Amino acid sequence: MMTPWSNRPLGGWRVLVPRGGPWGHGVASDLRAAGATPVVAPMINFAPADDAEALKVTLASLAAGAFDWLTVTSATTVDVLSAHQATVPSSTHIAAVGETTAAALTAAGYQVDLVPPEDNSAKGLLRELAQFEQYGAELRILTLRSDIAKPVLTEGLIARGHTVESVVAYRTIGVPVDEAIVRDIQAGAFKAVLVTSGSVAEQIQLQLGPLPETMIVAAIGPQTARDAEAYGVRVDLVAKERSAVSLIDAIVEMAKAAKADDE
């Protein structure tokens, strides 16, 4: 007997969601709506920065108006700002790397002044900040980052003559996946896995090894796809935009195309 779920585009799909928290569970809800069976198994987590005092001093400088711009490149950084009850004065503009980060900032009560319209990456943010560099004026910029983030934004801004303070806001650590999930993946019981960052890709390679050819590896954006491939994780599908909605849409479109080919 055909169930209501089987008529949905992802009916019968078991999908690994390797991030927890509000993002992971929100994605799981959207996947269920499309008929999939999501399994939320966080593969990374975040820990306080090793130099907590340096972060505290920097946030105090931020509150005192020491910076013209604050750049935020992840929703996790927003969590850090909220946890420290950080104040961003009106004289300091905030640049967010993408819509997801911008939404997290807005929800936390911060005003976002700049979001790259297309390229949601450090390079895209660097390119968009150029419009505020008038008459060769030197800007004072604070870049908050994870311990493993590449210094693309910081180095690019320094090269353009700005004063940049780059501070580690948090550390990224791996989380072991349940052995039962690993066995199911190796047995081909999962249809897809979502790759949401380079650090997630690294854990997929370390913990899951070569994935079955039948398992679709979907990356949230071009940069994440490149990072995944650098870690040795093949990528089958890349979302057009760096957002959960775009990622799920891409999987749904692939499923519909595959179903049409079978008919």
Image (cartoon, rainbow, N blue to C red):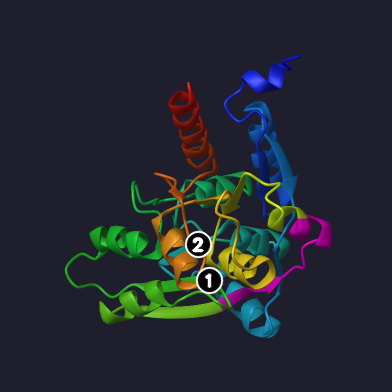
**Front residue of 58 and 63:** 58
Find residue 54 and report its horizontal and vertical position in percent: 63, 84
Say whether residue 136 is left or right of residue 228.
left
Q: Is residue 105 visible?
A: yes
Q: Quadrant of the N terminus?
A: top right
Q: For the point 67% across and 47% down, which residue is it?
A: 190
User: Mark 1 or mark 2, which has the lower sequence index?
Assistant: 2
- Residue at the image point whose x is 66% and y is 77% from the top: 56
Position of residue 62 in the picture relative to residue 38 (left or right): left
Q: CA distance from mark 1 to mark 2?
A: 6 Å
Q: Number of numbered discs present?
A: 2
Q: Residues within 10 Å of mark 2 (few under 14, many from 20)?
A: many
Question: Would residue 93 be visible to someone looking at this image?
Answer: no
- On the image, the x and y values in percent for residue 13 come to 65, 36
Amino acid type assigned to the residue bearing label 2 in the image: Val
Residue bounds of the magenta highlight: 168-183
The reply to whether the magenta stretch includes residue 236 is no
Q: Position of residue 127 (x, y in %)?
A: 28, 62
Residue 162 as seen in the image, left or right of residue 136: right
Type of amino acid under label 1: Leu
In the image shown, does 21 or 41 lie closer to the viewer?
A: 41
Disc 1, SS:
strand
- Label 2 sits on residue: 72
Residue visible at 83% across and 57% down in the picture = 180
Location of residue 87 (image quadrant): bottom right
Depth check: give the residue in front, 63 or 152: 152
Q: Are marks 1 and 2 in contact (CB under 8 Å)?
A: yes
Q: Is residue 77 above or below residue 250?
A: below
Q: Secondary structure at mark 2?
A: strand
Q: Is residue 180 magenta?
A: yes
Image position of 126 with respect to 26: above or below: below
State the residue position of label 1.
144
